Amino acid sequence: MTTAQRLGIDVGGTKCLGVVLDGAGEVLREHRLPTPKGPAAIIDTLVEVAEALAPFDTVGIGVPGLVTRHGVLRAAPNLVDINNFEVSALLGSRLGLTVEVDNDATCAAAAEWKVGAARGADDFVMVTLGTGIGGGIVAGGVLIRGANGFTGEIGHMIVDPGGPPCPCGRRGCWERYASGSGLGRLAREAADAGRLRRVVELAGGDVEGVRGEAVQVAAREGDVDALELVDEFCRWVALGLVNLTNLLDPALFVLGGGLAASADLYLGPIQRWFGRMLYAPELRPSPTLAFARLGQHAGAVGAALLPEVH
Amino acid sequence: MTTAQRLGIDVGGTKCLGVVLDGAGEVLREHRLPTPKGPAAIIDTLVEVAEALAPFDTVGIGVPGLVTRHGVLRAAPNLVDINNFEVSALLGSRLGLTVEVDNDATCAAAAEWKVGAARGADDFVMVTLGTGIGGGIVAGGVLIRGANGFTGEIGHMIVDPGGPPCPCGRRGCWERYASGSGLGRLAREAADAGRLRRVVELAGGDVEGVRGEAVQVAAREGDVDALELVDEFCRWVALGLVNLTNLLDPALFVLGGGLAASADLYLGPIQRWFGRMLYAPELRPSPTLAFARLGQHAGAVGAALLPEVH
């Protein structure tokens, strides 16, 4: 328990969300601004958010992309003009404070671990199911970072080498199936094959316009085709979780990201497929599957907690 | 550096190999006996190996299968009649010493980490390519074990859900492709399709009798079909290594197990495919690929080192 006020800012594709936490990890104040284009403008925006939230004693920043252990954002597909962006050094000199920087999924892991669904867990994996899939890994009570700080790029685990192309340049990455955009892709494939009439109707009659949201709406209406597609999607989610279990033997998975808001629709089928695919289920306690507790604040809260998990 | 004499015994499918290490990790004495059938006989054999190697101060045992953090071997497909075999408790009471027990691939990781190819590495993955594929993971300078002690079952990472059935009950596990038996399977598939004439000839003309060894012999003769198959095999090895890199961001892979004896044949193609499949290669230093140094002794040496890595 600290008495320091901890600032965390989550840099997203559309907005920068800042929070200040009290000693117990509760959000005292928050402030958001649109994410501008280019590194110089982003630094200005981060300073502006920080000033709006002063006073604070420590600073952490979450960014989408590959972040080195020295706070350099190597690349960020969802931001503009980012290439070896020295977030930590540039913002640190503006604020006159040490600035910890890490990947947004790593921040979400830190948040769920310290004040959310994974509190007290020594071995857990955070899985953020959004446009892509991100991850954070706690093993033996330590948030692991890897040689370069790039641990947890779990969305780019290849699960089907003959599968659809991924923007990363390869084929069959897990996030082509088990993310929000994966759900949309599976749905368009099914619609192209003449299934999912109700979903296509909800999407305005245009197969190419089908997204995961329409699948969710139809599934909630009880549409059989949509429920089958949700089941197929959950099988892909479970497959990746089973792989992660074989590698890391966690006691717990925390599923976050945009899809966590519809946990009611996904948790049952994911659990069923997970149980069916788990290796040696009779010899091990099955990891618990939980959904994230911190919602939209996870990245910013986790960023604020970075100084104490590093 | 310790002055204690450390006993380690590797329980394999066919033999139990014991070693005693000096303070520098060199093998002072070794002794081997055939692995008998059933838990009681195995304990007797372990006591016999230990007595032949006395005196010693600490004891570690490596076993093939899922081992709990309390030294219970839950199951071992390559041993007879094993089911919740309490290796640590049973042997400990016979020897009057604490007995550390872990999975053989974890032991190999400990050995390469402390006295082999991964000395000084803080983030590395040991990959044993034998009949199956085993693994050991060091992250942030710690040998990670997981919630139940089952970390590192990397051979059962599913890389092709529509692939061939695995004895574990699922389909398309990595070890169906990238292990010694995977090489044999790929070769029989190719031979069935009319390729690999020289390999089939070396196997006595019987496609069903084709094993990885014949592929290696033909490849060394320069047989084009065999070299192509080695290349395909190495692509599968690289695919799994790429997945592990995305998850764990290691600085180093150490490849061990039976196939490490033919490193000259495999290293080049594995490196080439690894470089082609690595995610964001321009943004990260490529992990080093090295072959194990400790050969057949890795399991026993690692078992002897267990007390200091736990």
Image (cartoon, coloured by chain):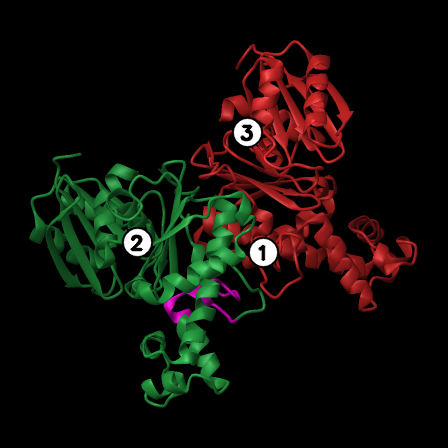
Chain colours: A red, B green
Q: Main secondary structure of the magenta part?
A: loop
Label 1 resides on the chain identified as A
Three-letter amino acid code of the residue under disc 1: Leu
For mark 3, does the 10 Å Cα neighbourhood hold few (<14), some (14 to 19), or many (20 or more) residues?
Answer: many
Quarter holding the C terminus of chain B? top left
Three-letter amino acid code of the residue under disc 2: Asp
Relative placement, left or right, of A14 versus B140 is right
Residue that numbered label 3 is attached to: A71
Image location (x, y in percent) of residue B151? 42, 47
Label 2 resides on the chain identified as B
Q: Residue A103's quadrant in the figure?
A: top right
Q: Secondary structure at mark 3?
A: loop
Image location (x, y in percent) of residue B1? 17, 34
Give the CA distance from mark 1 to mark 2: 26 Å
**Residue B175 lies in the magenta stretch:** yes
Q: Nearer the viewer, residue A131 or A269?
A: A131
In this rendering, does residue B168 appear at all? Answer: no
Q: Secondary structure at mark 1?
A: helix
Label 3 resides on the chain identified as A
Q: Nearer the viewer, residue B69 or B301?
A: B301
In this rendering, does residue A222 appear at all? Answer: yes
Front label number (2 vs 3): 3
Query: Vertically, is A158 above or below A137?
Result: below
Mark 3 vs 1, N-terminal side:
3
The residues colored magenta run B164-182
Residue that numbered label 1 is attached to: A239
